[in-house]
């Protein structure tokens, strides 16, 4: 059984240097795995398959030909230098915290860690920040980690959140298949979320969705009559939490369930985090997915 | 059924304040600062209906706050308890009760008093909310010990404080007081409850007792079928004198009020605590007898005597107390015409010499022998058919009368008033208009005697003295002065006896001589008491009483009580009552009245004086109180009359007394306390909820 010493995001928040933070998380995570930092590189043999016309004759395994008198082609693990693009939702709704760090900070750390980790995997890393549009975009490159981290460091909350427009733009901008990680609180209708993500998936990208929520958004622990203000729209409505909690939780569960169902059906990976969960736990989730995706057939 | 009204209903406007907690609990107090939330997309989907929003939360807290406010409002509005049923039927059911509780001493027989108190408590306990009652205690007199009230606690307290008295029973004053109370009452039903042993002696058949029309008389009869009682009704002393010694023989009247005969009852006489005689007596049922004890010597000081017999359920009347002292004879100076052997003074002398109650110390002088010294210690001077002394003697005699002495002027054949000096004529109540001689016609008779006069009232009763038998042959015609008063007149309207005040003394003139010459009155039986009565009157003699009845009041400033001048002049007197209690009286401040409220010996001493009491007063129960025979209820009912009264049968709204209103509106205190408790509880619950909310 693997055990991980997860790091509390609140503790990590004290680290001002985003790179140091990412390295702390990722290195600690990797050390914990006791695995080679070069996992997924193309030196790993996968399997043999019969030669098909058009295959590169250089990939014919002559030793097998010598023993079997048949042409087999060697297949290796995934190719190197995949694109990793972190899409970070910086809409106002992400700038919320009930206790500890905000969703935006959590998203920043997560994006930094994922980028750093990907870079360790020799992937090209890029970053896109969005609200209702693309705010900032760092194209994926093997040299852009610093820019990515710097961009993440400068992030400030944007305006209203909207996925379709920016994701459509991103999908059009990505020229190469990429691993796209969307970090967002997904405050849209699940169908709308799916529709937006489909733009990316339809371009051949692997889409991972990191759904970040605050614990208060999940449990709705409020008491007493309150006026609640929408962080994005500024709209206020009176709320009696005691009376509305049950319905809220039902709606939230239905929302999360629907998103999970739709994304699963669309073969997109979906991870739900609350901001109290350790970042390396998110990395672990990502790594598991990355491993399964890295096989090239 | 109990209902409410309010003394200050304007405060009920404050009930609108109950809307405050309603609003508070409906509107849900919202934070001043809005809570920022990432997205309201779910909350906006949750129907936020007004009805739901207006549901009251924290019901216990809301109820506490509302109830506390309601109680406060109600307390300020001063709720008044009203008996709704009574308000519907009050006009016909509210009663004015007068409880007449007999506290006369006959109620001490057996357990009558305890039963009477129990009955009284039961009656008070049975009072309705709108009933009012007055407790009247009565013996000889009646007094309401409580005002008309519906406060049962006050009535019960008055009953608890009631004490048995020593007075006799008189129903008249009690019923009269009850009548006055129910006549004033505004309750439609009037009820008089008589709790008594119905002693017959307390009922005056001649007295007509009226109650207002519609008033009911309820009698609680506490008498027993058979009440045995023995009593000493009186003790009288018969005096006898031998030389300088005076003796008294006591005769006691013993009554057997029971239906059983008494044989060989020992009756004892105690004088100054020492038993001086025991006599036996047998008494038939419901009879009385007398025992006479051997005489005993009377010393110079008063003696306290007690006659005692038997022992029964009413012990107080088994004793009879008296005080007896050597008599103080009235000193009389009789100025006659000649020697002692003569007949001029004979009848007068004899009449006075045989007097014992009181005795007379008679000094006889002829006009020529009379000196100033003879007037010294006299209380009465009789000028028996002599001229008025002239000169200094005449003036001193005038002064003697002016200072309170008595002068009897007997005008006969030798007095010759026309030749009297001026002083004599001034003292004479009448001018002398010559002599009337009726001997030829067999003499005149008396046609008028003023029996209302204190000196003659003894003869008022039938067979108490017959003046009509006397014949008057000659007499001086008296022309009465304006200030004079005729006490007896002849059939020709000429006055025989006339009186006139002079200074502090009194002068009586007799116009027909007292020597069996001008009239034959000295030979009539009435002569002797007449002379004694006239002299006693002139001497202002009052027979000292050997005992008093419970309930009498003694005026200690009255010199005739026997206490002497020291008692009259004392600045402070100390009275030792039979119970041993000492009471200080200050006669100069007019507190010289001694209420004789208990039987026994009351001893009066001059404060700071010697140990011997200046006056001892024996007090006994009214002998009538010893007769426990009960009255027939029908007699009472038959004697009562009902008179139409203004309020009888005309129900009027029940007016509550001030204290009754206060009692009924006292509810506001409880409401205020309840509100306070609720507010404290509200604070506690509110804090708990607030902490839980955080």
Image (tube, rainbow, N blue to C red):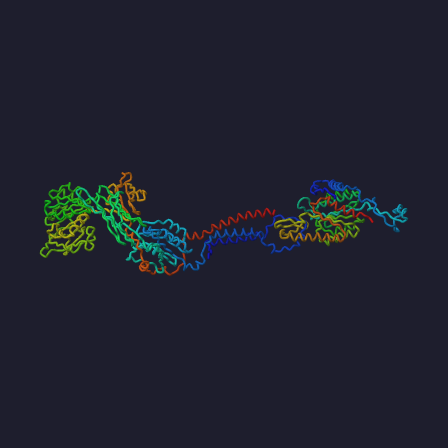
Q: Residue furthest left?
A: B440
Number of numbered discs overlaid on the protein picture: 0
Residue B355 position, x and y percent, is 17, 47
Residue B522 position, x and y percent, is 13, 51
Q: Is B560 rendered above or below residue B173?
A: above
Q: Is residue B364 visible?
A: yes
Residue B372 position, x and y percent, is 15, 41
Q: Is residue A183 left or right of residue B337?
A: right
User: Relative to the observer, which residue lies in front, A24 or B392?
Assistant: A24
Q: Residue furthest front?
A: B263
Q: Is residue A23 left or right of residue B417?
A: right
Q: Is residue B47 left or right of residue B474?
A: right
Query: Which quadrant of the figure has residue B377?
Result: top left
User: Relative to the observer, which residue lies in front, B553 or B413?
Assistant: B553
Q: Is residue B550 visible?
A: no
Residue B188 position, x and y percent, is 39, 59
User: Relative to the observer, which residue lies in front, B446 or A148?
Assistant: B446
User: Relative to the observer, which residue lies in front, B436 or B159?
Assistant: B159
């Amino acid at each position: 059984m693997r055990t991980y010493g997860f790091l509390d995001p609140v503790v990590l928040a004290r680290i001002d240097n985003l790179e140091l933070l990412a390295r702390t998380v990722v290195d600690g995570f990797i050390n914990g795995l006791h695995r080679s930092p070069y996992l997924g590189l193309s030196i790993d043999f996968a399997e043999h398959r019969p030669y098909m016309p058009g295959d590169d004759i250089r990939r014919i395994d002559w030793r097998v030909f010598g023993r079997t008198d048949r042409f087999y082609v060697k297949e290796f693990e995934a190719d190197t230098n995949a694109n990793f693009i972190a899409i970070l939702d910086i809409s106002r709704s992400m700038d919320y915290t009930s206790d500890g760090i905000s969703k935006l900070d959590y998203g920043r750390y997560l994006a930094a860690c994922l980028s750093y980790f990907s870079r360790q995997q020799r992937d090209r890393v890029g970053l896109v920040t969005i609200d209702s549009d693309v705010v900032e975009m760092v194209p994926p490159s093997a040299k852009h980690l610093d820019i990515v981290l710097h961009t993440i460091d400068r992030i400030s909350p944007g305006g209203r959140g909207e996925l379709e427009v920016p994701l459509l733009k991103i999908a059009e901008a990505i020229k190469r298949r990429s691993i796209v990680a969307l970090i967002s609180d997904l405050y849209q209708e699940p169908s709308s979320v799916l529709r937006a993500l489909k733009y990316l998936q339809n371009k051949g990208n692997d889409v991972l969705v990191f759904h970040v929520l605050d614990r208060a958004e999940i449990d709705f622990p409020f008491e007493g009559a309150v006026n609640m203000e929408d962080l994005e729209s500024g709209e206020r409505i009176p709320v009696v939490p005691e009376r509305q909690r049950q319905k809220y939780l039902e709606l939230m569960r239905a929302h999360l369930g629907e998103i999970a169902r739709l994304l699963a059906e669309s073969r997109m990976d979906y991870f739900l985090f609350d901001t109290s969960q350790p970042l390396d736990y998110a990395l672990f989730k990502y790594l598991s997915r990355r491993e399964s995706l890295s096989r090239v057939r | 059924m109990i209902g409410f009204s309010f003394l200050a209903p304007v405060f009920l406007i404050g009930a609108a304040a109950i809307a405050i907690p309603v609003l508070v609990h409906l509107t849900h107090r919202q934070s001043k600062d809005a809570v920022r939330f990432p997205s309201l997309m779910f909350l906006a989907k949750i129907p936020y209906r007004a009805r739901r929003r207006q549901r009251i939360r924290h019901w216990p807290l809301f109820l506490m706050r509302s109830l506390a406010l309601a109680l406060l409002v109600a307390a300020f509005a001063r709720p008044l308890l009203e008996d709704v049923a009574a308000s519907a039927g009050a006009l016909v059911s509210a009663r004015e009760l007068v409880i007449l509780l007999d506290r006369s001493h006959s109620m001490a027989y057996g357990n009558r008093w305890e039963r009477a108190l129990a009955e009284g408590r039961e009656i008070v306990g049975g009072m309705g909310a709108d009933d009012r009652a007055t407790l009247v205690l009565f013996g000889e007199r009646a007094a309401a010990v409580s005002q008309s009230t519906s406060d049962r606690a006050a009535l019960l307290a008055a009953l608890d404080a009631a004490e048995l008295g020593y007075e006799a029973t008189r129903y008249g004053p009690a019923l009269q007081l009850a009548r006055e109370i129910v006549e004033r009452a505004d309750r439609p039903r009037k009820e008089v409850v008589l709790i008594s042993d119905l002693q017959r002696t307390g009922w005056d058949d001649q007295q007509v007792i009226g109650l207002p029309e519609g008033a009911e008389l309820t009698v609680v009869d506490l008498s027993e079928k058979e009440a045995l009682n023995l009593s000493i009704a009186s003790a009288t002393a018969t005096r006898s004198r031998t030389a300088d010694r005076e003796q008294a023989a006591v005769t006691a009247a013993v009554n057997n009020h029971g239906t059983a005969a008494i044989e060989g009852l020992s009756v004892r006489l105690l004088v100054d605590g020492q038993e001086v005689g025991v006599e036996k007596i047998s008494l038939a049922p419901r009879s009385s007898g007398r025992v006479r004890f051997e005489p005993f010597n009377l010393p110079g000081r008063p003696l306290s005597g007690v006659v005692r017999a038997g022992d029964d359920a009413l012990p107080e009347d088994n004793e009879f107390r008296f005080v007896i002292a050597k008599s103080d004879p009235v000193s009389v100076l009789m100025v006659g015409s000649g020697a002692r052997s003569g007949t001029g003074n004979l009848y007068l002398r004899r009449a006075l010499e045989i007097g014992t109650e009181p005795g007379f110390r008679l000094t006889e002088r002829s006009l020529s022998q009379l000196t100033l010294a003879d007037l010294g210690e006299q209380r009465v001077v009789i000028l028996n058919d002599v001229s008025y002394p002239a000169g200094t003697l005449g003036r001193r005699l005038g002064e003697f009368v002016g200072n309170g002495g008595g002068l009897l002027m007997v005008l006969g054949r030798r007095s010759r008033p026309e030749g009297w000096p001026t002083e004599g004529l001034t003292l004479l109540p009448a001018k002398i208009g010559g002599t009337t001689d009726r001997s030829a016609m067999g003499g005149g008779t008396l046609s008028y005697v003023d029996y209302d006069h204190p000196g003659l009232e003894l003869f008022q009763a039938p067979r108490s003295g017959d003046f009509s038998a006397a014949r008057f042959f000659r007499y001086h015609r008296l022309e009465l002065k304006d200030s004079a008063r005729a006490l007896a007149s002849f059939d020709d309207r000429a006055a025989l006896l006339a009186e006139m005040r002079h200074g502090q003394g009194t002068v009586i003139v007799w116009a027909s001589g007292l020597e069996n010459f001008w009239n034959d009155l000295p030979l009539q039986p009435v002569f002797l008491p007449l002379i004694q009565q006239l002299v006693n009157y002139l001497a202002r003699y009052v027979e000292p009483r050997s005992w008093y009845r419970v309930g009498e009041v003694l005026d200690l400033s009255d010199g005739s009580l026997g206490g002497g001048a020291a008692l009259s002049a004392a600045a402070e007197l100390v009275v030792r009552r039979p119970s041993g209690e000492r009471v200080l009286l200050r006669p100069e401040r007019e507190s010289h009245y001694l209420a004789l409220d208990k039987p026994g010996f009351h001893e009066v001493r001059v404060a700071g004086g010697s140990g011997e009491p200046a006056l001892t007063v024996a007090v006994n129960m009214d002998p009538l109180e010893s007769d426990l025979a009960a009255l027939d209820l029908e007699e009472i009912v038959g004697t009562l009359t009902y008179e139409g009264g203004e309020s009888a049968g005309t129900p009027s709204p029940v007016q509550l007394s001030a204290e009754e209103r206060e009692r009924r509106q006292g509810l506001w205190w409880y409401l205020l306390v309840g509100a306070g408790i609720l507010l404290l509880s509200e604070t506690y619950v509110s804090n708990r909820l607030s902490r839980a909310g955080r």
